[in-house]
């Protein structure tokens, strides 16, 4: 009994140590794991020498070295990691610089490949104007495999992982193209919308470099996705300014660059930018690493106020949500935004920090979103017979359920956390464990919906 | 084991690459075991701060001298094992040559220093013990 209790205490100490080390941004999760293995080994060898658990733990930690100099060493070695600019002076060795350069060159090469890939189908007579359906369904397939390739190269993923990735992309390519879609039909549009979601999870597996099972790595991928989105939008804005100026300049000499834009620049740059943005997120993590959480902090209160005002208005004016065929899609969007806000505030939160006002705010946001959604679902349920089960509506309903389940259980976990019943990590785990669900649902829409609804 | 002066930090740092490579040339290993082997070989005189081994390993991995893979250890935890690569072996041979050269050079001067010791016999050994030959005599 007592020995067991002491074992638990040791586990607690190691857990504390682990989350303490994790906050050193130069030491990544993988390395923490490696250091932890060392620590445990050291502890058990000291225990064999008849030390008590506390003593063994103290000595083992001490021998590991003080964390400041340790994370300095790590930052020095892993130039791509956070904090580098802050921690390490500019005396990096040539080798780290050359490895950073190499990464940039590879990323740029892959971006060029993506740009070429999108133009390749034209050789087979598939034009951007004439075969929009083909391009819409396949657009993610032109760039995600290359992006996955970048991560495979960077993380030196094993051959088993590589096979899984290849299988994922091949399956995506098959299901995007074997079905006899009715041009511009709902199922085709659904495939175009859902395939990228499913394949993004495949990119996630590549990002994890064979460690997809690790919740921390999944959380890293969530962070990466958010930052990538922000970078992509920034690049797109810059691209807009660039092409606007270009159009003006050429107009001045009487040349219309519009066709060039349409056929070359926009498709090629839009795809290449995905790879470039990913590389930038990886290489410059430290620069705007906290962008997604900052935006979250900014918009969580605003959305909370909006939803509460909405609910209050409905209560006081007695107005109900009016039935509308596109109702579900609007509320899906709402839930997705709320989930995004929740996810990114979770990703940036130190699990050991005590609860604060922002946590309460998040819970209020989630619960009010659930209430609003419940009202919308209520409206729909009462008139479901009028709606008819078109593919769009079934997809929207499925998404609503997927998001609703996530948010409902998140609310439960969050409330439990606020009452001190569960640690914050359980909420984190719930989110990271839930990630595959989005991919699976998207895959179902891509694979099963077209035949179910007759490719309309 | 009377002579247990810890080895100077710079020397430890300089010798870390060949030492780690040589230990891995004996067979695949992981962090804790590598450190244990270092202690064993140096009779505890090479004092490494345990954690510092890992940045060294990661540097060698990045340079392609060693490669890492995760394996389940006997306790069921994941453990990162390192293996020396072909490039690492070449590097090890090169380092070995360089250290050999350093060693030879030092040996040359040691023996040159030692000669007058023996020649004058008792007189010098009284004032300056051989073990202290490295340090200036006071």
Image (cartoon, rainbow, N blue to C red):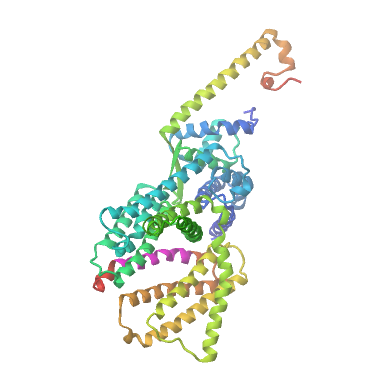
Relative placement, left or right, of A106 versus A163 is right
Quarter of the figure that contains the C terminus of chain A: bottom left
Q: Which residue appears at 46% of the width and 39% of the height?
A: B29
- Is A337 drawn above or below residue A52 in the view shown? below
- How many labels were placed on the picture? 0
Residue A435 is covered by the magenta coloring: yes
Looking at the rendering, the stretch of residues picked out in magenta corresponds to A429-446
**Is there any visible trace of residue A315 in the rendered image?**
yes
Res. A444 visible in picture? no
When the figure is inspected, residue B88 is found, relative to residue A10, above or below; the finding is above
Toward the right, the furthest residue is B138
Q: Spot the residue most to the top.
A: B119
Helix, strand or loop for the magenta stretch, by majority:
helix
**B25, A382: nearer the viewer:** A382
Q: What residue lies at 36% left-to-right and 68% top-to-bottom?
A: A441
Image coords of residue A176 (percent x, y): 29, 62
Residue A358 point in image, percent of width and height: 60, 70
């Amino acid at each position: 009994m007592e020995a067991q209790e002491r074992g638990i205490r040791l586990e607690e100490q190691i857990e504390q140590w682990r989350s303490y080390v994790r906050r050193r941004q130069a030491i990544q999760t993988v390395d923490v794991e490696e250091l932890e293995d060392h620590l445990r080994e050291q502890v058990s060898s000291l225990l064999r020498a008849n030390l008590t658990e506390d003593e063994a733990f103290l000595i083992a930690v001490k021998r590991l070295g003080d964390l400041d100099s340790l994370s300095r060493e790590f930052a020095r070695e892993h130039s791509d990691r956070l904090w580098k600019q802050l921690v390490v002076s500019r005396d990096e060795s040539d080798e780290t610089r050359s490895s950073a350069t190499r990464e940039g060159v590879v990323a740029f090469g892959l971006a060029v490949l993506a740009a070429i890939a999108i133009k390749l189908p034209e050789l087979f007579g598939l034009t951007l104007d004439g075969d929009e359906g083909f391009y819409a369904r396949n657009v993610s397939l032109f760039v995600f495999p290359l992006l996955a390739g970048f991560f495979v190269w960077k993380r030196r993923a094993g051959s088993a992982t590589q096979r899984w990735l290849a299988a994922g992309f091949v399956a995506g390519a098959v299901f995007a193209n074997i079905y006899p879609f009715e041009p511009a039909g709902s199922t085709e549009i659904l495939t175009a919308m859902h395939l990228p979601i499913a394949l993004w999870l495949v990119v996630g597996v590549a990002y994890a470099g064979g460690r997809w099972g690790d919740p921390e790595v999944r959380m890293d991928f969530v962070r990466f996705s958010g930052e990538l989105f922000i970078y992509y939008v920034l690049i797109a804005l810059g691209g807009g300014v660039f092409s606007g100026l270009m159009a003006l300049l050429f107009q001045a000499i009487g040349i219309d660059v519009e066709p060039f834009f349409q056929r070359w620049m926009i498709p090629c740059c839009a795809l290449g930018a995905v790879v470039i943005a990913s590389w930038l997120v990886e290489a410059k993590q430290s620069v705007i690493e906290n962008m997604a959480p900052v935006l979250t902090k900014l918009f969580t209160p605003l959305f909370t106020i909006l939803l509460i005002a909405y609910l209050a208005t409905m209560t006081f004016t007695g107005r109900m949500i009016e039935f509308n065929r596109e109702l579900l899609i609007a509320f899906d969007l709402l839930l997705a935004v709320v989930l995004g806000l929740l996810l990114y505030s979770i990703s940036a939160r130190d699990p050991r920090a005590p609860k604060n006002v922002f946590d309460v705010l998040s819970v209020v946001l989630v619960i009010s979103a659930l209430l609003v959604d419940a009202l919308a679902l209520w409206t729909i349920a009462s008139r479901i017979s009028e709606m008819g089960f078109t593919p769009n509506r079934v997809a929207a309903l499925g998404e609503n359920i997927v998001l609703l389940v996530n948010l409902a259980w998140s609310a439960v976990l969050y409330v439990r956390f606020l009452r001190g019943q569960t640690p914050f990590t359980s909420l984190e785990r719930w989110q990271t464990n839930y990630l595959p669900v989005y991919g699976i649902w998207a895959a179902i829409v891509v694979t099963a919906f077209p035949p179910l609804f007759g490719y309309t | 084991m009377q002579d247990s002066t810890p080895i100077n930090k710079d020397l430890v740092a300089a010798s870390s690459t060949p030492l780690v490579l040589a230990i891995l040339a004996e067979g695949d290993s992981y962090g804790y075991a590598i450190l244990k082997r270092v202690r064993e070989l140096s009779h505890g005189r090479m004092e490494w701060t345990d954690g510092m081994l890992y940045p060294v390993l990661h540097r060698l991995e990045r340079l392609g001298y060693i490669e890492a893979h995760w394996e389940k250890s006997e306790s069921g935890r994941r453990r990162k094992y390192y293996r020396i690569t072909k490039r690492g072996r070449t590097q090890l041979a090169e380092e070995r040559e360089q250290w050999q050269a350093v060693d030879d050079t030092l040996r040359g001067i040691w023996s040159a220093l030692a000669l007058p010791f023996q020649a004058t016999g008792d007189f010098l050994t009284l004032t300056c013990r051989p073990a202290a030959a490295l340090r200036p005599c006071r």
